[in-house]
Amino acid sequence: MADRVKKLKVNLRVNGIGLNNHLFPIILSVLLLLAVKACFYKRSSSRFSNMKLPPGPMQLLVIGNLHQLVGAPFHVVLHELSKSYGPICHLKLGQVSFVSVTSSEGAKEVLKAQELRFAQREKLPIMEMTSFDHNGITFSPYGEYWKKVRKICMMEILDTSGIGQQHFKSLRELEISALVESVRCTSQLPFNVSEMIFACANSIISKASFGSQCKRPDEYRLAIKEQFCLAGQFSFPMVFPSLQFLYHLDGTKAKMVRLHAVYNDILGSIITEIRIRAKSGDHSSSHEENLVDVLLRLQESPEKTGISLTDNMIKDIINDMIGGGTDTLPTAVECGLSEMLKNPDVMEKAQAELRDALKGKAILEETDLEKISYLKLIIKETFRMHPAATVYERVAREDCVVHGYDIPKDARVVINPWSLRRDPNYWENQRNSIPRDSRDLPLTWLGTISSFSCSVRGRGRVPQKGSRS
């Protein structure tokens, strides 16, 4: 029996990440699941009995379709299921209904035609544990507050004519130069590219957010990384919301409370220091306005924004901005490099173009990017093949109909951009690593293609620099 349990712990994989290593919560949760299923089975069955749900695989007692996620990442499983059950597929994962959408037409229906019905993002309990009153951008409920905070980010922070853009440009060039020099110094030794790019991206965004006021940058960066790791791990409460107490048993709650304390201490001291400096009138010529400066200025003028920003709101906004920017850049760069390494001819051509653009310069400047065309194609192809988020989840705010199928209220609607960008109806070669398909497409730096713009937009979308929707 012990060998079987050990083998189960090793083999069970959900979304590419192993299940919890603690045996006791697993055994306890299985027993509780049977009881929970018995309580809710009749109610859920009667609710869906009169609905025309999308087609999907047969469901097992208690776990539903959870067993079908074993052995492959979530987005890949959804892509394979769409081949058998169509572009709109229904799954029951534990207590939660999931509707997978893997066609551009279905994505347009969800995120454009009926965007108000699907404007709500899923609430992740693990992320909420580190939140300050749930006042951030990413997971705040759709409503007036979310729209006003998003407007602040768009108009005051991310607009290309906004705060300190020239300063941010110099900051980016300085940090990237330091990254290149660090790579050059370790060129004869193995090094972790992902770690170095993660640190560089975090440093750029952190300094743009609160300047040099952060006295514990390494601790803050490690806290963000640990939060991402915990949020990415599978846990039973994700699909069995009635079992939230398991977060206490497996230690997740304690870890997130500790991270919350770290965020509160670091961000609280930064806000206090910047507020004191502003009140003292200490505005040196070398100081550039940063994200915290802007938010504190808006805090003093609630009539301008329509909301009264509290310190906790500011902390949540800062965490969302830094976390979102830090996580996506290393992933994109790592994927682009791995594709070029698998295609040496592409790598050689890109290197030749860079050498020609440098023309004796020590480092490439942002103004030189206009001269680089082939590398842009590689970036476009990277965006296509490796989207920053492999799935986008929305929550149905009410019962509705999509392409003739009933979508129940509170169902998780999963848009799969990874599958969309491999649609044979749009791409001649779905697994093409050579930048050929992207050459003539109007692809923006957000990775948005005109025919696929619905896959990254909609009212639930987190604002990004350069966007206008």
Image (cartoon, helix red, strand yellow):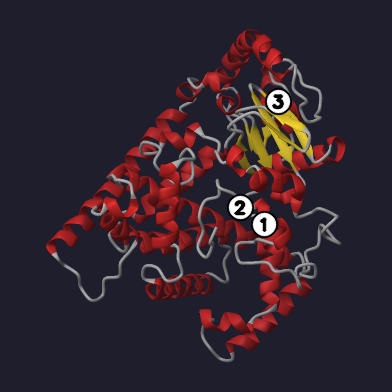
Neighbourhood count class around disc 2 (C-alpha, 10 Å): few under 14, some 14–19, many 20 upward: many
Looking at the picture, tell me which residue is in the foreground, 426 or 269.
426
Q: Where residue 411 sits in the image (x, y, percent)?
A: 64, 30
Is residue 154 shown left or right of residue 337?
Answer: left
Binning the other alpha carbons within 10 Å of mark 1 as few (below 14), some (14 to 19) or many (20 upward) gives some
Q: Which residue is painted at 53% across and 88% down in the image? A: 361
Mark 3 residue crowding within 10 angstroms, few (<14) / some (14–19) / many (20+): many
Dot 2 amino acid type: Arg
Secondary structure of the residue carrying numbered label 3: strand
Residue 469 seen by the camera = yes
Horizontal placement of 409 versus 282: left or right? right
Which disc is residue 342 wearing?
none
Picture disc at residue 453? 1
Q: Amino acid at mark 1?
A: Ser
Q: Quadrant of the C terminus?
A: bottom right
Q: Are marks 2 and 3 in contact (CB under 8 Å)?
A: no
Identify the residue at horizontal 56%, vertical 83% (top origin): 368
Q: Residue furthest left?
A: 280
Q: Is residue 441 above or below residue 258?
A: below
User: Residue 388: horizontal and vertical position, in percent?
Assistant: 61, 54
The residue that disc 2 covers is 457
Instruction: Say which quarter of the image contains residue 155.
Output: bottom left
Label pair 2/1, CB-CB below 8 angstroms: yes
Q: Which mark is residue 92?
A: 3
**Mark 1 / mark 3, whichever is N-terminal:** 3
Q: Secondary structure at mark 1?
A: helix
Lower position in the chain sequence, tag 2 or tag 3: 3
Where residue 262 appears, as percent x and y from the top left, is: 33, 42
